[in-house]
Image (tube, rainbow, N blue to C red):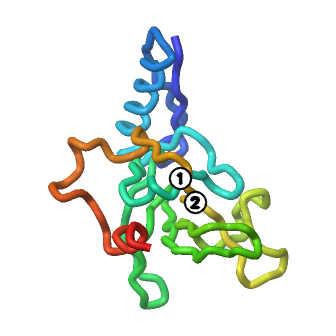
Amino acid sequence: MASLRFLTELSAEVLVPLEGNTPQELRSAVLRAQRAFGQQGWRCCPLPPGGFLFPLANEPDFDWRLLGARRGICTIDSEERDGVWYAGQFYTRRALDPNPRMKLGRAIKYSRGARSTDPAEGVEGEEGSAFRYVTLAVFRGEGRRREEYAVPRELRPAGGRRSPASREALSA
């Protein structure tokens, strides 16, 4: 039997058994467990260096429960910011313009300022620079939208859940 390992908000490790007779059934079971336990803030994997990478088309209605995160607003330096809460820290939503020189298209990035306690492999920016950060997720590229990463249709509010920042992302 397969199992999925979660870390609670207090870093307790919990193994959740999963059932599925086919790869598709097992995949569905994994996503259901990630949503159910992620809603409580439980995480099933460590944050990869550079953050998680998803297609840009998934950003407006991405189901943050899959990562153990939730959308939110936070006031930082007297400025109210859109973003995501993950593992007790706030990651600000940033719209990145295309960079033709580096051959990078438009992107949406969720990141926060780095702290001295962050693992070195997860910190981006030049050593000694005042601008060092940790990325939770990047939505970039014209890749195919992954419907299984979206908030399930039956849980979306009437008219769809679109924050002002998400509406801006779709119209750009």
Residue 162 horizontal side relative to residue 130, left or right: left
Going from N to C along the chain, the mark reached first, 1 or 2, is 1
Q: Residue at x 40, y 31 (%)?
A: 33
Category of crowding for the residue at label 2, using alpha-carbon neighbours closer than 10 angstroms: few (below 14), some (14–19), many (at least 20): many
Label for residue 140?
A: 2
Residue tagged by mark 1? 55
Residue 114 horizontal side relative to residue 148, left or right: right
Q: In the rendering, at what x and y percent does residue 155 appear?
A: 23, 45
Q: In the rendering, at what x and y percent does residue 117 appear?
A: 70, 64
Amino acid carrying label 2: it is: Arg
Q: Secondary structure at mark 2?
A: strand
Q: In the rendering, at what x and y percent does residue 104 appear?
A: 68, 67
Q: Is residue 83 above or below residue 38?
A: below
User: How far, Cα to Cα, is label 1 from label 2?
Assistant: 5 Å
Amino acid carrying label 1: it is: Pro
Figure label count = 2
CB atoms at circles 1 and 2 under 8 Å apart? yes
Label for residue 116?
A: none
**Residue most extreme to the right:** 127
Q: Residue at x 43, y 90 (%)?
A: 78
Q: Quadrant of the C terminus?
A: bottom left
